[in-house]
Amino acid sequence: MAAELILHHYDFSSYSEKVRLVLGLKGLSWRSVDIPPVLPPRGARRAGGEGRANDRIR
């Protein structure tokens, strides 16, 4: 059984649009996690110490 792909992305990103297009053309099973385009509140914990989230697939 193949793992399902999860795309973490900004909805307005042109790069994530290209990735979604290719995933659809290849017929791959994937899920989408939208990242809000606002900064977290001051003092909020960040996963992995990153200052921002990049478009990525896990």
Image (cartoon, rainbow, N blue to C red):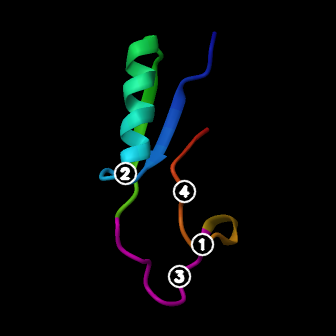
- Tell me the element at label 2: loop
Quarter of the image that includes the N terminus? top right
**Alpha carbons under labels 2 and 4: distance apart:** 10 Å
Q: Type of residue at label 2?
A: Ser
Query: Which residue is at 69% across, 65% downward?
Result: 48
Measured as percent of width and height from the top left, residue 7 is found at 48, 39
Lower position in the chain sequence, tag 3 or tag 4? 3
Query: Which residue is at 61% across, 38% downward?
Result: 58
Q: In this figure, which residue is indicated by the disc labeled 3?
A: 44
Q: Which mark is residue 13?
A: 2
Lower position in the chain sequence, tag 1 or tag 2? 2
Q: In this figure, which residue is indicated by the disc labeled 4?
A: 54
- Tell me the element at label 3: loop
The picture quadrant where one finds residue 38 is bottom left
Q: In this figure, which residue is indicated by the disc labeled 1?
A: 46
- Please tell me whether mark 1 or mark 2 is closer to you in this view: 2
- Tell me the element at label 1: loop
Vertical order, 16 against 21 (above or below): below
Is residue 14 shown left or right of residue 29? Answer: left
Q: Which residues are magenta?
A: 37-46
Lower position in the chain sequence, tag 1 or tag 4? 1
**Alpha carbons under labels 1 and 4: distance apart:** 13 Å
Classify mark 4: residues with Cα within 10 Å, few (<14), some (14-19) or many (20+).
few
Q: Which sits in the foreground, 20 or 31? A: 20
Secondary structure, magenta segment, majority class: loop
**Alpha carbons under labels 3 and 4: distance apart:** 18 Å
Vertical order, 2 against 37 (above or below): above
Q: Are marks 1 and 3 in contact (CB under 8 Å)?
A: yes
Q: Which sits in the foreground, 31 or 23? A: 23
